[in-house]
Amino acid sequence: MTFGNTLSLYFILLLIPMVWVWRRSLVDQDSAKKKLSLVLRLLGFVALVIALCRPYLKQEINDLHVVYLVDSSQSIDPASLSDAQQWIDDSRRKQGPNDSSDIFIFGTKVRKMTSAQLKQFSEQAIAGTTESGFRSATPISKALLSMRTVFPTNKAKRLVILTDARNTGALSADALETLSDEGVGVVYHVLDPLQKPEVAVASLTPSTDFAYQGEMLRLSATLISNCDQTVEARLLNRGIVVTREEVKLVSDEQKVINIDAEMHTAGASQWTLEIIPKEDFFASNNSASTTIKVKGLPRFLVIHEDEKQMRPFVRSMKKQGVTLELRGEYGIPNSFNELLAYDGLILANVSATSLSTEQMENISRYVTDFGGGLLMLGSENSYGLGGYFKSPVEDVLPLTSRYEKEKQKPSLAMVLVIDKSGSMSGTPIAMARASAMAAAELLSPNDQIAIVGFDGSPQLICPLTSAANQASIQAAISSLAASGGTNLYPAMVEGRNILQEATAKIKHMIILSDGQTRAANFQSLTQEMANEQMTISTVALGSGAAKDLMQQIANEGMGRYYETNDPQKMPQIFTKETMKASRSSIKEDLFNSLIVGDHPVLNGYADGELPFVLGYVMTRPKPTAQVLLAAETGDPLLAISRYGLGIGAAYTSDLTEKWGGEWLSSATGGPFWAQTLRAIARKEESAGLTSKITHDGERMIITAQRRNERGESVELVPWDIKASDENGKEVTLQLTQNGLGSYQGSLSTEGINSLNIRLHDKLADLTKSINWQRDYPREYKLTNTTDSGITSLLQPRSDSVFTNISPTHSYKNASWIFVLLGFSLILGGLVIRRL
């Protein structure tokens, strides 16, 4: 016996006052009768309390109710539905006299049927006259859960699901667990998938939803067939066939084809991939469409320290419909909003030392967070030569400044002489350590480095050490600390002595100081080092540095002079100087431009058709880089990669007369680079406004994110939203804030085939357009995987469905028994009391 409520048992405590009242009763009665009357009444009271606890009596049940749940979706072969009906009839003949059963079929919904109705349905499926909408989905989990309420309470429960286990809804694991917890035993009977020849276009995906007019865009289509056959694939735009090709399909293997197409006209452009199969059952899955927003002419900002060298390239791009605005060395916008006015940025020939830390961070965010395009060209101020090693700009480029120095290149011995006086405390000494570490990391294993720190006297921080031993070098640099005065001359002598002992072909010294030093014969020492083929470069940090002296040392030492008031720039200066001193990062000769990758920008070009180059900067591709062009040496010439929302590209040669004269004069040069710039340009005008579409059945959920130019969330956006269907009918949509910078709204897509939605932030005047088109149901894609939760179930024979049942139990309400017993006992007690 079990109880539905045990709290009522507290009423038994009332027995205590009842006994107390009885003991003080003045009724004159035989003691035995008096006690018997009390006991009967107390027992009656207890029986009524038990009745209040809703007692249930447990009974074993061997009767069974079976539910047959038949998958009737389009993925099931029609003949298999007829077999299922016969299998169910055979199974039901074995049910016992007290057993029972029901039949349900499911597609988009669940329907109850008799055996005769199922037979008629299977005949209609074979004839192709069933309702296609009902059979257009296989939501197995939803169908299983709908069976929870169809079982009677006084019988054991068994559910037989007849399916091919190809699920288009949520996986069944949770639903099966729920049924098991409720005592429903689920078993599985396999139905054959569609046996008739069937081909489907599973998807059509563009490389981007936005493109520029004239851009060559790649569309990827996934095709699948349940049998070996050859189909004709056609790409259509505005109903006109753009291209066609024969595609061989292998049974049950997905085939991805890539088609490059030129975006001719601005505006929303719909592209459709359709197939013409030799054998096919369903026609509805023979095409797929996508909408691409095509913009007008892209606008790029070009930075070059000598603007006139880039003018021929600017004129060439103008002829191709690409606008380039040319600026000098310090032309990078200081305002992030000004940078957002351009679709892309070309760093043609500008050193990292000419950019502030904030400008480099803005360029990185411009690419990753706002979808801007970035192209770096090769020059003596690019990549590592320009000081970009480990900078925010290099983070969004596909090529890194590190490379393997060729063995025949001369080795380098370098001494860093670093001011560590008290005035260098804090950020300056920290940046000095970072600069030394970056310089050491750029050296090849054949090179050597030493570090001399100086205050009032020199201190050897790191003796001349092979650059292959990075661990000990980095550890030594970490010990550099600021204190004391400033005396440069002894430190230079110490560095000179170290270089004299070195056997390297190239000997170079870099001096960093932020203050005045004691007077000494620097000219004589510098001249002596120059005579011994040692070069010296200097870095003057801050307004208090001895700039005239530092410049004099660099000039007489045949090196380079740098000055900066920003300690954050020191790593860029040191890496730039290290690369220049090694004299091994530039190759100048005649090199072919070999095609080594696959990308839409290469469409229409073959090896031997692209111009040669006269030189390039040596780099190494990152793991995520897609190298498109390379020299015959194997070094990359052109590489591309995506970073966040934007694209970074790197070309290691240049586009001036120095190395790229052949590109400028070639008939293929202009179209090729126009195609490349369109490919990397920012596709969204709505910088800071992104959106995502998800679906819950026939409910479309739109989520929008708003960020300002600093990447901060924007709250309380005043939205102006317009939405219309394929007939131009307006559809209501509202967005409400549901998080920091996050806004969400939903609308019903029932009966709608396409939607055009415009989100407008009235305050910031930002607009984003969303195009949605209904795809054909997943049931027809032939790409649905089998549900492992179903396939792992027991598979009984038709004659064993009603056997091997574990006994179950039912619970009958016994409250009425205790109510009757309670009142009987109380009545008996009263009768005895009256006798």
Image: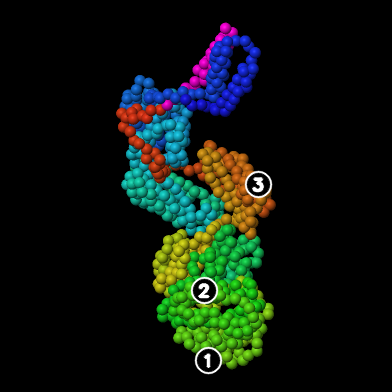
> Would residue 80 appear left or right of 356 to someone viewing this image?
left
Kind of element beneath mark 2: helix
What residue is drawn where x is 52% and y is 78%?
578
Circle 3: is it few (<14), some (14-19), or many (20+) Cα within 10 Å?
some
Whether the magenta-drawn stretch holds residue 252 is answered as no
State the residue in front, 226 or 247: 226
Give the spatial CA distance, label 3 vs label 1: 74 Å
Sequence order check, earlier mark of 2 and 1: 2
Residue 464 x %, y %: 49, 82
Kind of element beneath mark 1: helix
Circle 1 residue: 531
For the residue marked with disc 2, what is the amino acid? Answer: Ala
Give the spatial CA distance, label 3 vs label 2: 58 Å
For the residue marked with disc 3, what is the amino acid? Answer: Asp
State the residue in front, 87 or 4: 4
Residue 123 x %, y %: 36, 29
Sequence order check, earlier mark of 3 and 1: 1
Kind of element beneath mark 3: strand
Do the residues bearing badges 3 and 1 touch, measured as CB atoms within 8 Å? no
Circle 2: is it few (<14), some (14-19), or many (20+) Cα within 10 Å?
few
